[in-house]
């Protein structure tokens, strides 16, 4: 009995030592991060090379048509204005006086024309009356000739007075037009974005070839659109109407649906090493344009092709030569496979063949020593996240 007990004690000690020795001599398993092969959507996209810009539907840089001293500033920065509303006015008392004088002259000319009309009509009626008397030999021929000449003269006098009245009205219109050039009106409803000028300052319109600040910058924020520079190589793939996805730093990871509305017909060479084509996008949902501010920086992804409910993997798992490492849970080892990829972007890659849904592929492919048959264990932290 005693010998039998000693036998079992020695056996257990030897088993423990063997297990400890095997554990110490066996290779340590590498820890890897994995992700499942899954069904989902994969898109082929192009993105802007530099930050795009959110722009107001309409933007106008406004200045009076002539130079002058600013005498009326009817708005302030941030004001909402309506179409036709007065924004500013230059000193124009001289033109107002000229307009008043021209209006008075026009009224005088109109009255003179009316007087000439009455005299011409009276002379015409008198000539007709005398013509009837002449036909019955009641008056001499000399009398009727004088009456006809007077009527003709009065008719020409009326035409001259009428022309003078029209000239006076035209002069009044010219002065009124000059007066309008001293006033700046809102061409459309919007918000005053900037005002460059103060009361009594002298405003000068921009001469040809010389850029000067506008007096007022007006934004129509009833709607917005996006301009995004696309690399010239990718621009040829983009079509008007293509779907797009918009993100803005101001809204974090929120995505906005959009579509391409215009592709510039020329290449911008502002940067010689990165020539781009400007693409304009519009929001698909008008509700998305609420609470936006013109000037936001924008990132745009234009969707060239899309496949839904297809097998996909994270693009970061794909190695050169279309290789991936698949985790074999039964063996606790990696298996290297070559797959046939389809559509791809920097986030997801379509798998046409080589993998099955639910298989686990390695994401941490930058670890040294990773190869076919490597014993590994799955990162517990990553497994918890999954």
Image (cartoon, rainbow, N blue to C red):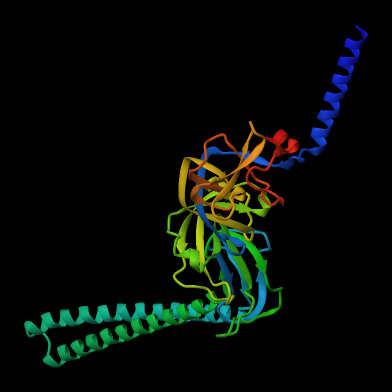
Residue 51 figure quarter = bottom right
Work out whether residue 84 or residue 368 is closer to the camera in this orientation and state it.
Answer: 368
Work out whether residue 80 or residue 218 is closer to the camera in this orientation and state it.
Answer: 218
Left or right relative to 77: residue 337: left
Work out whether residue 366 or residue 8 is closer to the camera in this orientation and state it.
Answer: 8
Q: Name the residue at the bottom extreme.
A: 142
**Looking at the image, is 19 positioned above or below residue 282?**
above
Quarter occupied by the N terminus? top right
Residue 288 locus on image (x, y percent)? 57, 47
Q: Name the residue at the front extreme.
A: 3
Which residue lies at the image location 76% right of the left edge and 41% below the top edge? 27
Residue 95 figure quarter = bottom right
**Looking at the image, is 117 positioned above or below residue 284?**
below
Residue 356 locus on image (x, y percent)? 52, 37
| Count of marks, rendered view | 0
Residue 292 locus on image (x, y percent)? 62, 52
Q: Name the residue at the right extreme.
A: 2
Q: Name the residue at the top extreme.
A: 1
Quarter occupied by the C terminus? top right
**Looking at the image, is 18 positioned above or below residue 57?**
above
Left or right relative to 105: residue 13: right
Left or right relative to 4: residue 217: left
Residue 382 locus on image (x, y percent)? 71, 38
**Looking at the image, is 377 positioned above or below residue 251?**
above
The answer to whether residue 320 is visible is yes
Work out whether residue 243 or residue 126 is closer to the camera in this orientation and state it.
Answer: 243
The answer to whether residue 285 is visible is no
């Amino acid at each position: 009995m005693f010998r039998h007990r000693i036998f079992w004690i020695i056996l257990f000690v030897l088993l423990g030592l063997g297990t400890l020795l095997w554990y110490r001599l066996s290779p340590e398993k590498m820890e890897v991060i994995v992700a499942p092969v899954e069904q989902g959507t994969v898109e082929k996209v192009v993105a802007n090379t530099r930050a795009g810009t959110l722009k107001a539907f309409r933007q106008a840089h406004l200045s009076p048509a002539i130079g002058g001293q600013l005498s009326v500033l009817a708005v302030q920065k941030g004001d909402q204005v309506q179409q036709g509303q007065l924004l500013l006015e230059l000193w124009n008392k001289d033109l107002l006086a000229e307009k008043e004088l021209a209006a008075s002259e026009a009224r005088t000319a109109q009255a003179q024309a009316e007087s000439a009309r009455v005299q011409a009509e009276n002379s015409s009626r008198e000539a007709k009356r005398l013509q009837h008397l002449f036909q019955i030999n009641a008056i001499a021929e000399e009398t009727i000739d004088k009456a006809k000449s007077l009527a003709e003269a009065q008719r020409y006098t009326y035409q001259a007075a009428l022309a003078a009245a029209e000239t006076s009205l035209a002069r009044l219109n010219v002065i009124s037009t000059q007066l309008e050039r001293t006033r700046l009106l809102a061409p459309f409803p919007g918000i005053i974005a900037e005002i460059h000028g103060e009361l009594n300052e002298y405003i000068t319109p921009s001469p040809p070839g010389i850029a000067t600040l506008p007096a007022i910058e007006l934004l129509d924020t009833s709607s917005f659109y996006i301009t995004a520079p696309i690399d010239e190589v990718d621009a040829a793939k983009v079509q008007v109407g293509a779907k797009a996805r918009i993100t803005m730093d101001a809204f974090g990871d929120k995505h906005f649906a959009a579509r391409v509305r215009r592709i510039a017909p020329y290449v911008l060479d502002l940067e010689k090493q990165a020539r781009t084509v400007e693409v304009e996008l519009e929001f698909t949902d008008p509700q998305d344009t609420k609470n936006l501010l013109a000037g936001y920086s924008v990132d745009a992804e234009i969707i060239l092709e899309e496949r839904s409910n297809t097998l996909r993997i994270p693009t970061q798992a794909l190695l050169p030569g279309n290789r991936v490492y698949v985790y074999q849970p039964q063996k606790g080892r990696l298996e290297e496979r070559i797959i046939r990829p389809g559509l791809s972007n920097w986030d997801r890659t379509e798998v046409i063949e080589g993998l099955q849904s639910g298989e686990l592929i390695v994401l941490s492919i930058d670890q040294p020593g990773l190869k076919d048959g490597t014993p590994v264990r799955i990162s517990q932290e990553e497994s918890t996240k999954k």
